[in-house]
């Protein structure tokens, strides 16, 4: 009888502890989602400001950008549909998000300092790594061998030289990637919350 | 000539139009801005080429594209135009034809989930099937063409109504569009609520809302409102379609009606109050002035009219004073020991006949002589004695009476004397007459009020000046007569007078043949009050007061023993103060021949308030 009680108490305690850690993890996830949403908003605002600063003839030039030049992050394998995203594991999504954020850490310096994008990206990266660790729970990380994608040749040369097309391309790519990460993290967060609605 | 010019003009015009059309055709494939492709507006006359009207995605999973054949009616037949698309992936894919042409909708190309890739650039082209002509090209990425479906389930609930009943607040609720997968987090939507009055043209917009409810404040009760909501993806600009409008109407609360009479009542009440106040003020103006601004009392000297005194009309003054009730003869009668020197009124007219000196020295009156006690060298009968008031210049030795003493003996009671006001007999300068006189009165007592009590002088050598006081009172005549019979006493009142008046000595002697009552009778020695006690304006005469308290200027107040110093027969006059009163030095003892012992008598004297005709009394008495 005493042993049963002890066992029961241990189980209950572990449940509570796990719930506590789960809640902490949940809080971190929510925090990460909020941060990436903010970055996405920043990117949208930057593009809007850029378009407004253009002269009408320049705007017509801008329309010729599309078909969009390729972004640097196109090399990173990422789900492109809803089904595909939902089928991916949380860990995979976290990894992809981590890589995407990491790929923009350096080029974000060109985007401008007032918004402190680089710092925010760095913070988000740290947060995602923490989430990854929490997800792994001791399992070895299988994705370490992937290296960062190589940038395009002239990807970073364009910025600052007044080339409208390339500036616009940079901004557009940044916004697109932020939206990607936001979607991935949101889906992962829902999945993590053990809500029945989040699962397929 | 004119025909040629017109033809040439027409040609030029046509050429220009053709150039324009061609240039437009050239530019259209390249002029598409991502996500902002708008249909071109052409005038119907100009040829409109087939073009994409728009491409849209509802839920970020599929999308559709629509085109238009333009003015080329022959191309509007189904199958004349084809849509080709290409995804800009890293290995460029081939151009594929539209996976599905919607059967039900004309000129629509539908891309299902398989063919939809988010975050991938697409280019669609509109080509003629028969010819190798590309009429239009349009490039985009799917997330940039997402227009969410409208929210569903829009309803409202009343939050509250304002106290005035004119405004109310509502809470509007809705559900996200079912096609958008918000639950799994695939899409995050922002909603915008718009409302307007039924007949208005402009919509009021509220802030973007992440949740599925919003409050609308400040709506008016008697108006009907229309509310609708639409949504977009967060951080994107493409709003979806609006939801169906709902209509909000709240009937005005009837309390609004009851407010009106309240206001009217209030206004009328205030007006009435103001009018009443004005009436009060105007009718009671005088009173209010008195209350608010009390009149400052002018400096007014109580008492006798100074004009009267200046003119020296003592008659009127005496009449005034005599008319006072305090000079009641009855009181005199009651008080046996009240004695005073009564001046004969007849002598008043005959003053001129004989000098005062003569009168003083050689005064022989029947009444006076009648008194055995009078004239004795031994001063007077001890029984008679207590006559602390020295009679003015009444020598005991001298038979004659004090010239100022006018005797109105009982035998000759002059009715006039009785009734007539008592006039001060003499007005003599103090110093002159008395120096010549070989008589003096002994100051037997000094009252605490400063009055000198003179007793009938015993020694002729000792000079003593005792300013006689005026005494008036016609009323006292009656009393005097009575008392004359009882005793003979002299009472001296030293009158403090105003600056303008010389003190007059009025002495009345009452002869009293009756046995002398040992009671201390005279107590009159109304000396001028101590400086400061008496009002300056007092210039009237004194009354020989009885022992009553009502007579303010009679009799010492305090127990005489304590006040009076040890009195000898004679008291040296120390000084005369400004009020013509004698200040005696009580510490000069002399051996009196027949000194009265005032101390004996004094204690027996009733303690009567000593005073003079105070201004207050005068004021009361004066008309």
Image (cartoon, coloured by chain):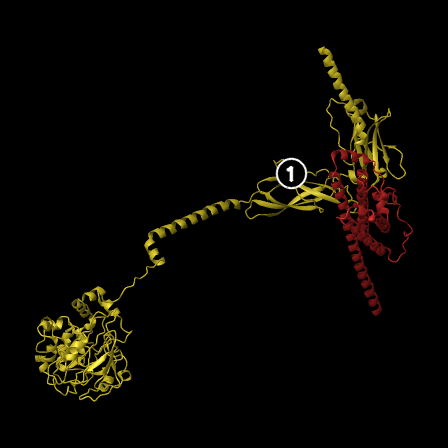
Chain colours: A red, B yellow
Total residue callouts: 1
Residue furthest toward the top?
Answer: B1
Taking B394 as reference, is B265 above or below it? above
| Residue B226 in view, yes or no | no
Q: Quadrant of residue B428?
A: bottom left
Taking B222 as reference, is A32 above or below it? below
- Where is residue B6 drawn, in percent x and y? 72, 14
Say which of B158 and B67 sits in front: B67
Residue at x 56%, y 43% (from the top left corner): B252
Left or right: B519 as drawn, with respect to B57: left
Residue furthest toward the right?
Answer: A145
Badge 1 element: loop
| Residue A95 in view, yes or no | yes
Q: Quadrant of residue B397?
A: bottom left
Q: Residues within 10 Å of mark 1 (few under 14, many from 20)?
A: some
Q: Quadrant of residue B462?
A: bottom left
Residue at x 27%, y 65% (from the top left corner): B301
- Where is residue B533 drawn, in percent x and y? 28, 74
Location of mark 1 (residue): B203
Say which of B575 and B285 sits in front: B575
Left or right: B518 as drawn, with respect to A77: left
**Quadrant, the C terminus of chain B:** bottom left
- Where is residue B140 drawn, in percent x and y? 81, 36
- Where is residue B356 drawn, in percent x and y? 12, 75
């Amino acid at each position: 009888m005493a042993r049963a009680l002890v066992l029961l108490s241990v189980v209950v305690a572990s449940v509570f502890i796990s719930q506590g850690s789960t809640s902490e993890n949940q809080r971190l996830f929510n925090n990460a989602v909020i941060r990436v949403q903010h970055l996405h908003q920043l990117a949208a605002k930057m593009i809007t400001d850029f378009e407004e600063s253009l002269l009408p003839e320049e705007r017509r030039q801008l329309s010729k950008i599309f078909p969009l030049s390729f972004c640097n992050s196109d090399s990173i394998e990422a789900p492109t549909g809803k089904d595909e995203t939902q089928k991916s594991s949380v860990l995979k999504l976290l990894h992809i998000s981590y890589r995407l954020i990491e790929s923009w850490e350096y080029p974000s310096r060109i985007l401008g300092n007032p918004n402190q994008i680089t710092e925010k990206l760095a913070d988000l990266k740290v947060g995602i790594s923490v989430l990854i660790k929490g997800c792994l729970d001791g399992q070895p990380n299988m994705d370490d061998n992937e290296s960062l994608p190589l940038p395009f040749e002239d990807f970073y040369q364009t910025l600052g030289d007044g080339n409208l097309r390339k500036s616009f391309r940079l901004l557009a790519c940044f916004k697109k990637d932020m939206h990607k990460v936001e979607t991935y993290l949101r889906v992962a967060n829902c999945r993590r919350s053990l809500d029945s609605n989040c699962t397929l | 000539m004119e025909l040629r010019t017109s033809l040439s003009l027409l040609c030029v015009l046509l050429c220009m139009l053709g150039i324009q059309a061609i240039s437009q055709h050239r530019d259209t494939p390249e002029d598409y801005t991502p996500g902002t492709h708008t249909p071109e507006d052409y005038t119907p006359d100009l040829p409109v080429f087939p073009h994409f009207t728009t491409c849209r995605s509802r839920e970020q999973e599929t999308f559709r594209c629509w085109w238009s054949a333009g003015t080329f009616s022959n191309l509007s037949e189904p199958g004349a135009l084809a849509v080709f698309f290409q995804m800009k992936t890293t290995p460029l894919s081939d151009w594929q034809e539209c996976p599905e042409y919607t059967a039900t909708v004309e000129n629509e190309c539908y891309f299902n989930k398989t063919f939809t890739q988010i975050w991938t650039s697409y280019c669609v082209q509109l080509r003629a099937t028969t010819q190798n002509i590309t009429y239009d090209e349009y490039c985009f990425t799917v997330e940039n063409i997402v227009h969410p479906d409208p929210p569903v389930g829009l309803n409202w609930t009343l939050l509250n109504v304002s106290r005035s009943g004119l405004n109310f607040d509502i809470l509007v609720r809705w559900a996200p569009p079912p096609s958008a997968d918000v639950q799994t987090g695939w899409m995050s939507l922002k909603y915008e609520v718009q409302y307007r009055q039924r007949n208005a043209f402009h919509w009021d917009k509220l802030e973007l809302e992440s949740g599925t409810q919003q409050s609308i404040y400040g709506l008016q009760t008697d108006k009907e409102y229309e509310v609708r909501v639409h949504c977009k993806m967060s951080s994107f600009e493409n709003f979806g379609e609006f939801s169906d409008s709902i209509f909000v109407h709240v009937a005005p609360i009837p309390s609004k009606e009851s407010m009106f009479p309240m206001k009217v009542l209030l206004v009328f009440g205030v007006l009435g109050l103001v009018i009443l106040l004005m009436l009060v003020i105007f009718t009671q103006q005088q009173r209010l002035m008195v209350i608010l601004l009390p009149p400052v009392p002018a400096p007014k000297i109580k008492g006798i009219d100074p004009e009267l005194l200046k003119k020296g009309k003592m008659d009127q003054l005496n009449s005034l004073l005599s008319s006072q009730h305090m000079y009641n003869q009855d009181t005199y009668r009651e008080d046996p020991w009240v004695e005073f020197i009564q001046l004969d009124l007849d002598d008043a007219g005959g003053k001129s006949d004989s000098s005062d000196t003569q009168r003083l020295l050689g005064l022989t009156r029947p009444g006076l002589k009648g008194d055995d006690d009078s004239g004795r060298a031994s001063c007077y009968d001890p029984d008679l004695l207590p006559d602390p008031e020295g009679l003015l210049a009444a020598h005991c030795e001298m038979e004659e009476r004090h010239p100022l003493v006018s005797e109105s003996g009982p035998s000759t009671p002059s009715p006039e004397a009785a009734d007539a006001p008592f006039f001060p007999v003499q007005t003599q300068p103090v110093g002159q007459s008395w120096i010549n006189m070989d008589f003096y009165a002994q100051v037997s007592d000094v009252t605490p009020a400063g009055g000198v009590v003179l007793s009938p002088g015993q020694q002729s050598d000792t000079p003593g000046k005792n300013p006689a006081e005026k005494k008036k009172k016609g009323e006292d005549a009656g009393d005097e007569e009575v008392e004359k019979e009882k005793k003979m006493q002299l009472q001296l009142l030293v009158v403090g007078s105003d600056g303008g008046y010389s003190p007059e000595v009025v002495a009345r002697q009452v002869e009293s043949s009756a046995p002398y009552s040992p009671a201390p009778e005279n107590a009159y020695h109304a000396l001028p009050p101590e400086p400061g006690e008496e009002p300056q304006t007092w210039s009237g005469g004194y009354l020989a007061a009885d022992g009553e308290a009502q007579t303010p200027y009679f009799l010492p107040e305090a127990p005489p023993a304590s006040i009076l110093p040890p009195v000898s027969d004679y008291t040296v006059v120390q000084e005369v103060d400004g009020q013509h009163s004698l200040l005696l030095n009580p510490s000069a003892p002399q051996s009196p021949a027949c000194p009265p012992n005032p101390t004996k008598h004094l204690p027996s004297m009733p303690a009567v308030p000593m005073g003079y005709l105070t201004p207050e009394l005068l004021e009361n008495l004066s008309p």
